[in-house]
Amino acid sequence: MAEKFDCCLKCFDKFCANTCVECRKPIGADSKEVHYKNRFWHDTCFRCAKCLHPLANETFVAKDNKILCNKCTTREDSPKCKGCFKAIVAGDQNVEYKGTVWHKDCFTCSNCKQVIGTGSFFPKGEDFYCVTCHETKFAKHCVKCNKAITSGGITYQDQPWHADCFVCVTCSKKLAGQRFTAVEDQYYCVDCYKNFVAKKCAGCKNPITGFGKGSSVVAYEGQSWHDYCFHCKKCSVNLANKRFVFHQEQVYCPDCAKKL
């Protein structure tokens, strides 16, 4: 700042005036001066570095050696939209996902470019898809109803199903997570398989389900037995995986067969 001594206006402007940091011209005696931290401006040069709004009579913020108005300071500190790269300021509707933020209208489907906004979407690498485009491009389709499987679903023998579509062909009970039996591309719950499909044991007359006890089966000449039911008619010795004699629709061990 100029030292305090008397001089004419012409000499003041030439030798004593401070230099404006904006326009680099002297701040003459007849000009208004703004002073901040040993820097000087004409009052008309003291403006926001971003929007050029005059700040001589307003509050301001000094940041990184720049003078900013309050509005531009807010924008400087605000997160930037991933779509348009402009600031997201207070009051703007926005979408945030994994630390990245968009204006609501900038968050669009990578395929059809329609605004997703705050609606449902599917991330795929760096891209985002609306429900319709994701179903078209990526979703598996249920082998029963042929509609897209957007969530959940099950796979059996490399084929995708909706959980609601994978049901017993007889009673429509859901089979996901349950024990079931497949017969000629038809699926049955345990109860329906036992009651309507399973062969009956020639010994105990109960269904042979293949589940639990008796999962091993003995078959001979069109008849089937639980392995634990396949025993000699006379002495009751179990004959599963042993030699036997089949006589008049009955099973005998070799010793008992000799006595017939």
Image (cartoon, rainbow, N blue to C red):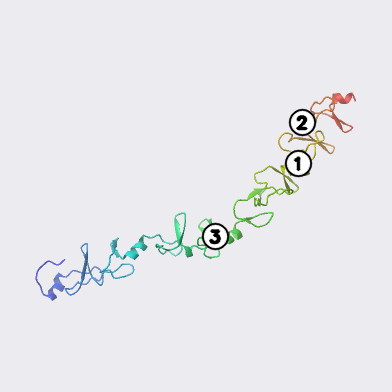
Which residue is depicted at the point 86% across and 24% down? Answer: 256
Residue 129 circle label: 3
Q: Is residue 55 left or right of residue 255?
A: left
Real-space Cα distance between discs 2 and 1?
A: 18 Å
Looking at numbered disc 3 in the image, what kind of residue is underneath it? Tyr
Residue 118 circle label: none
Which residue is depicted at the point 77% across and 35% down? Answer: 217
Q: Percent x, y for residue 18? A: 18, 69
10 Å neighbourhood of mark 3: few (<14), some, or many (≥20)? Answer: many
* Residue 217 shows in the view: yes
Q: Earlier in the sequence, mark 1 or mark 3?
A: 3
Q: Which residue is mark 1?
A: 194
* Residue 197 shows in the view: no
Q: Earlier in the sequence, mark 3 or mark 2?
A: 3
10 Å neighbourhood of mark 2: few (<14), some, or many (≥20)? Answer: some
Looking at numbered disc 2 in the image, what kind of residue is underneath it? Tyr
Looking at numbered disc 1 in the image, what kind of residue is underneath it? Lys
Q: Nearer the viewer, residue 141 or 94?
A: 94
Q: Percent x, y for residue 191? A: 73, 42
Quarter of the image where the C terminus is located = top right
Q: Which residue is mark 2?
A: 228
Q: Nearer the viewer, residue 72 or 189?
A: 189
